[in-house]
Image (tube, helix red, strand yellow):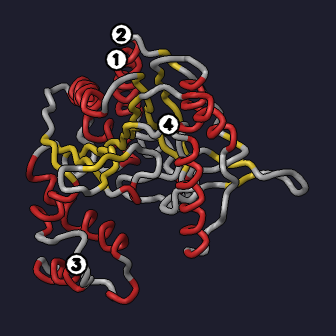
Amino acid sequence: MTSEFKPTCTRENWIKRQTLMNKVRQFFVSRDALEVETPTLSNAGGTDPQLDYFQVGVEGEPPRFMMTSPEFHMKRLLAAGFGDIFQITKSFRKDEFGSHHNNEFSMVEWYRVGWPQEKLMDEVEGLVSEILGKPIHARRTRWVDAFRNYAGVDPFCEDLNCFADACAKRNIPTPDVSSMSQEDWWDYLMVFIIEPTLASNGPEFILDYPPSQAALAQTYKDADGFTWAKRFELFVDQVELCNGYTELTDAAEQRRRFAADLEIRKTMGKPLPPIDEHFLAGLESGMPACSGVALGLDRLFMLAMNQPEIGDVILFPSPIA
């Protein structure tokens, strides 16, 4: 009973973590990125249907939202001419617990003006290599090919039983087909089939997602006329480390996507946050072409320190905080 006050991370591990954190900061400083610090609380929350946020405030006053990411504020800085920027910060997401999750977590988010996402992916490899202490050369696989090659299924198949069949072939518990949308199946197969497969291939980027899974990214059409979002994620040892985009700079299109997100949230019975008008004003003023990425530091430090649980590298994870 008397041990309940203690942190889950040892003093020795915390010292190692601080050394790694200093390396992260030096990585960006040495590459001429400006460190910034943006608010934890905001008048608007993100609209992503897959993210749940903490709402705070007092009766009679407008609600405030704990940021799930510093993205909107950082893009306002880009629009104001700050150039290449990075931020090491805490972010907050409701109902996220587990060996790789905590609802308060540390991330580094950064933006490179004028860079395509491919160049930013190279820099992600550089940072991860620096922190893991070994060179990381990640395979680059399109999202649609990951489903075809690793799950053996066409993600756009019209008969949703094809997803259930893919699970049955691998003795994976199969949800009720009638309760699952196509996008629900995408998420389910990604977690239970594709991500475990990635672990056996070594580090791997998954890129070019369906537009519905990247509301803040630019899109493009491939040679076959299909539209894809310029989004990428890096997986190392079955751990998702980052999420990056070639950033959308069209304010009108961004507003349309926010509205579509809110409609989805409404059908899911989720709270409807106000749209961030300050962020949209920044886009309207002319945010420069850029690519940006957010990388989970707690997860990266877990890998660097060879620790199995996120609680081994943070002092007080949410259940005991």
Identified at 40% across, 24% down, the residue is 112
Question: Which residue is identified by label 2?
Answer: 30
Where does residue 160 sit, x and y in percent of width and height? 27, 82
Question: Which residue is identified by label 3?
Answer: 163
Indicate the quadrant where residue 191 lies.
bottom left
Q: Label 2 amino acid?
A: Ser
Mark sitting on residue 291: none
Question: Which residue is identified by label 4?
Answer: 249
Q: Label 3 amino acid?
A: Phe
Contact? badges 1 and 2 (CB < 8 Å): yes
Indicate which label's residue lies in the foreground, 4 or 2.
4
User: Considering only vertical position in the picture, is 150 above or below 28?
Assistant: below
Contact? badges 4 and 1 (CB < 8 Å): no
Identified at 16% across, 78% down, the residue is 166
Q: How many marks?
A: 4
Indicate which label's residue lies in the foreground, 2 or 3.
3
Tell me which label, 4 or 3, sits earlier in the chain. 3
Q: Label 1 amino acid?
A: Phe
Using the rendered image of the protein, determine whether residue 49 is visible from the camera's viewpoint: yes
Identified at 54% across, 61% down, the residue is 261
Tell me which label, 1 or 3, sits earlier in the chain. 1
Indicate the quadrant where residue 78 lies.
top right
Contact? badges 1 and 3 (CB < 8 Å): no
Q: How many C-alpha atoms fall within 10 Å of the one at disc 3: few (<14), some, or many (≥20)?
A: many
Question: Which residue is identified by label 1?
Answer: 27
Q: CA distance from mark 2 to mark 3?
A: 46 Å
Using the rendered image of the protein, determine whether residue 2 is visible from the camera's viewpoint: no
Indicate which label's residue lies in the foreground, 4 or 1.
4
Task: Pick whichever, 168 or 249, lies toward us.
Answer: 249
Mark 3 element type:
helix
